[in-house]
Amino acid sequence: MEPGSVEREVGSEDICAVVVDAVADAKGVHPLDLEPKLYDVIEPDALVDLWSSSDSPPRSMRIGFSMAGCDVVVRGDGRVVVTPGEPTPDPTGASVGE
Protein backbone atom coordinates (compact mmCIF):
# COMPACT_ATOMS: atom_id res chain seq x y z
CA MET A 1 0.00 0.00 0.00
CA GLU A 2 1.31 3.46 -0.89
CA PRO A 3 2.07 6.06 1.79
CA GLY A 4 -1.03 8.12 2.57
CA SER A 5 -3.34 5.38 1.34
CA VAL A 6 -6.35 4.25 3.33
CA GLU A 7 -7.43 0.62 3.41
CA ARG A 8 -10.75 -0.67 4.69
CA GLU A 9 -12.22 -4.14 5.04
CA VAL A 10 -15.74 -4.42 3.60
CA GLY A 11 -16.99 -7.33 5.70
CA SER A 12 -20.77 -7.20 6.08
CA GLU A 13 -20.97 -3.41 5.63
CA ASP A 14 -22.50 -1.69 2.62
CA ILE A 15 -19.81 -1.45 -0.08
CA CYS A 16 -20.81 2.10 -1.03
CA ALA A 17 -20.60 3.30 2.59
CA VAL A 18 -17.15 1.73 2.97
CA VAL A 19 -15.91 3.45 -0.21
CA VAL A 20 -17.27 6.86 0.82
CA ASP A 21 -15.87 6.58 4.36
CA ALA A 22 -12.45 5.50 3.07
CA VAL A 23 -12.27 8.39 0.57
CA ALA A 24 -13.36 10.86 3.27
CA ASP A 25 -10.65 9.52 5.61
CA ALA A 26 -8.03 9.81 2.86
CA LYS A 27 -9.08 13.42 2.19
CA GLY A 28 -9.52 14.32 5.87
CA VAL A 29 -13.10 15.51 5.41
CA HIS A 30 -16.58 14.49 6.55
CA PRO A 31 -18.19 12.01 4.10
CA LEU A 32 -21.02 14.46 3.33
CA ASP A 33 -18.45 17.10 2.29
CA LEU A 34 -16.95 14.99 -0.52
CA GLU A 35 -17.17 16.41 -4.03
CA PRO A 36 -17.93 14.82 -6.38
CA LYS A 37 -20.32 12.40 -4.70
CA LEU A 38 -20.04 8.65 -5.31
CA TYR A 39 -23.10 8.71 -7.58
CA ASP A 40 -21.39 11.35 -9.74
CA VAL A 41 -18.48 9.03 -10.62
CA ILE A 42 -19.94 5.53 -10.59
CA GLU A 43 -23.43 4.05 -10.48
CA PRO A 44 -23.79 2.88 -6.86
CA ASP A 45 -26.30 0.15 -7.76
CA ALA A 46 -23.85 -1.25 -10.32
CA LEU A 47 -21.09 -1.28 -7.69
CA VAL A 48 -23.38 -3.14 -5.28
CA ASP A 49 -24.44 -5.57 -8.02
CA LEU A 50 -20.83 -6.30 -9.01
CA TRP A 51 -19.81 -6.73 -5.39
CA SER A 52 -22.73 -8.98 -4.46
CA SER A 53 -23.11 -10.86 -7.76
CA SER A 54 -22.28 -14.08 -5.93
CA ASP A 55 -21.89 -15.26 -2.35
CA SER A 56 -18.22 -14.34 -2.57
CA PRO A 57 -16.69 -12.12 -5.27
CA PRO A 58 -13.70 -13.67 -7.07
CA ARG A 59 -10.51 -12.78 -5.15
CA SER A 60 -8.99 -11.57 -8.43
CA MET A 61 -11.81 -9.05 -9.05
CA ARG A 62 -10.76 -5.40 -9.08
CA ILE A 63 -13.02 -2.40 -9.62
CA GLY A 64 -11.15 0.86 -10.03
CA PHE A 65 -12.32 4.46 -10.39
CA SER A 66 -11.40 8.00 -9.35
CA MET A 67 -13.34 9.98 -6.77
CA ALA A 68 -12.62 13.33 -5.12
CA GLY A 69 -9.02 13.37 -6.34
CA CYS A 70 -8.33 9.82 -5.14
CA ASP A 71 -7.79 6.50 -6.88
CA VAL A 72 -10.19 3.92 -5.48
CA VAL A 73 -9.76 0.16 -5.89
CA VAL A 74 -12.34 -2.32 -4.63
CA ARG A 75 -10.73 -5.75 -4.47
CA GLY A 76 -12.36 -9.16 -4.49
CA ASP A 77 -10.55 -10.06 -1.28
CA GLY A 78 -12.85 -7.65 0.58
CA ARG A 79 -10.58 -4.62 0.73
CA VAL A 80 -11.10 -1.07 -0.46
CA VAL A 81 -7.86 0.84 -1.06
CA VAL A 82 -7.94 4.62 -1.55
CA THR A 83 -4.85 6.52 -2.65
CA PRO A 84 -5.02 10.32 -2.59
CA GLY A 85 -3.34 12.33 -5.29
CA GLU A 86 -3.68 12.91 -8.97
CA PRO A 87 -5.99 10.25 -10.39
CA THR A 88 -4.88 8.42 -13.49
CA PRO A 89 -6.69 9.87 -16.53
CA ASP A 90 -9.32 7.45 -17.77
CA PRO A 91 -11.70 8.58 -20.49
CA THR A 92 -14.41 6.20 -19.27
CA GLY A 93 -14.09 7.20 -15.60
CA ALA A 94 -14.06 3.61 -14.35
CA SER A 95 -12.51 0.23 -14.95
CA VAL A 96 -13.51 -3.28 -14.05
CA GLY A 97 -11.12 -6.18 -14.31
CA GLU A 98 -10.62 -9.76 -13.24
Image (cartoon, rainbow, N blue to C red):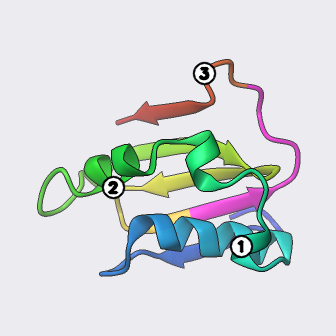
| Foreground disc of the pair 1, 2 | 1
Nearest to viewer (mark 3 / mark 1)? 1
Specify whether 42 is left or right of 28: left
Q: Closest to the observer: 26 or 35?
A: 35
The answer to whether any part of residue 94 appears in the image is yes
Q: Which residue is mark 3?
A: 92
Quadrant containing the C terminus is top left
Q: Magenta segment range?
A: 81-89
Question: Between disc 3 and disc 1, whose residue precedes?
Answer: 1
Q: Quadrant of the N terminus?
A: bottom right
Tell me: 62 left or right of 32: left
| 83 and 43: which is toward the camera | 43
Q: Is 87 covered by the magenta stretch?
A: yes
Label 1 or label 2, whichever comes before in sequence order: 1
- Residue with the mark numbered 2: 48
What residue is shown at x 27% (from left), y 49% (from top)? Answer: 49
Q: Residue at x 38, y 73 (%)?
A: 14
Q: Nearer the viewer, residue 33 or 81?
A: 33
Left or right: residue 11 versus residue 88 is: left
Residue 43 falls inside the magenta stretch: no
Task: Give the structural element (helix, strand or loop) at label 1.
Answer: helix
Secondary element at image label 3: loop
State how far apart marks 1 and 2 are (Cα). 20 Å
Q: Residues within 10 Å of mark 3 (few under 14, many from 20)?
A: few
Q: Amino acid at mark 1?
A: Leu
Q: Which residue is mark 1?
A: 32
Name the amino acid, label 2: Val
Task: Name the kind of residue labelled 3 in the image.
Answer: Thr
Q: Are marks 3 and 1 in contact (CB under 8 Å)?
A: no
Q: How many marks?
A: 3
Vertical order, 96 against 57 (above or below): above
